[in-house]
Amino acid sequence: MAVLVLNYDYQPIHITTWRRAIILVLKQKAEVVEARSDRRLRTVRTEYAFPSIIRLMRYVPVPYKHIPLTRQNIFRRDGFRCAYCGTSHNLTIDHVIPRSQGGESSWENLVTACESCNRQKGNRTPQQAGMPLLIRPRKPHYLLFWLRGAEEVDTSWRPYLMLEARV
């Protein structure tokens, strides 16, 4: 069960486990903003609601809003699927516009491709090869990137994430 972590100013900064969230609350480093009503944690002396959203008690500067451009992050952004055929086997990285034609190594020009599609496309653009992309490559928003790894997205998170405005 994932828990959304808000900074002191209510800006979402991270997603953590329920265990880590409860530790932060018990150490008085965070407070529960919203709790789940369906589950409770019982100790010998007291009972706690499982948190859904917590807020840190002091402001923490967030320098890591930048997602590094790495092979693993390209795979993750594309859902570990080939951008041409959708398979999840023998994955590689492909330049949409080949480097020989001036293509750069950027979020907007790199996609996940299986070895077969990468070989078939070769040194051509998707249009030249007749292989349309199933996804539009773009730089991911750091919070939406984290959410892909979350086992579930609680509906109570929506006002803090403003998902309607970003999707």
Image: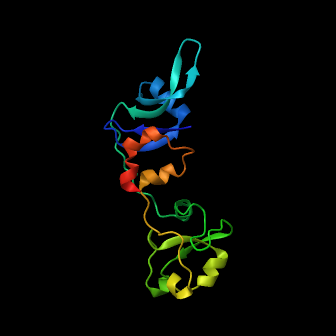
- Closer-to-camera residue (152/112): 152
- Closer-to-camera residue (45/66): 45
Q: Is residue 125 visible?
A: no
Name which residue lies at 44% across and 60% down.
Answer: 140
Please tell me whether residue 96 is drawn above or below residue 5 in the rendered image.
below
Name which residue lies at 68% across and 69% down.
Answer: 90
Name which residue lies at 59% across and 83% down.
Answer: 121
Q: Position of residue 160 (x, y in %)?
A: 37, 42
Name which residue lies at 35% across and 53% down.
Answer: 165
Please tell me whether residue 141 is drawn above or below residue 162 in the rendered image.
below
Q: Quadrant of residue 167?
A: bottom left
Q: Position of residue 94 (x, y in %)?
A: 55, 75
Q: How many marks?
A: 0
Please tell me whether residue 6 is drawn above or below residue 26 in the rendered image.
below
Q: Position of residue 138 (x, y in %)?
A: 44, 66
Q: Is residue 166 visible?
A: yes
Colour scheme of the rendered structure: rainbow
Q: Position of residue 5 (x, y in %)?
A: 43, 38
Q: Quadrant of residue 158?
A: top left
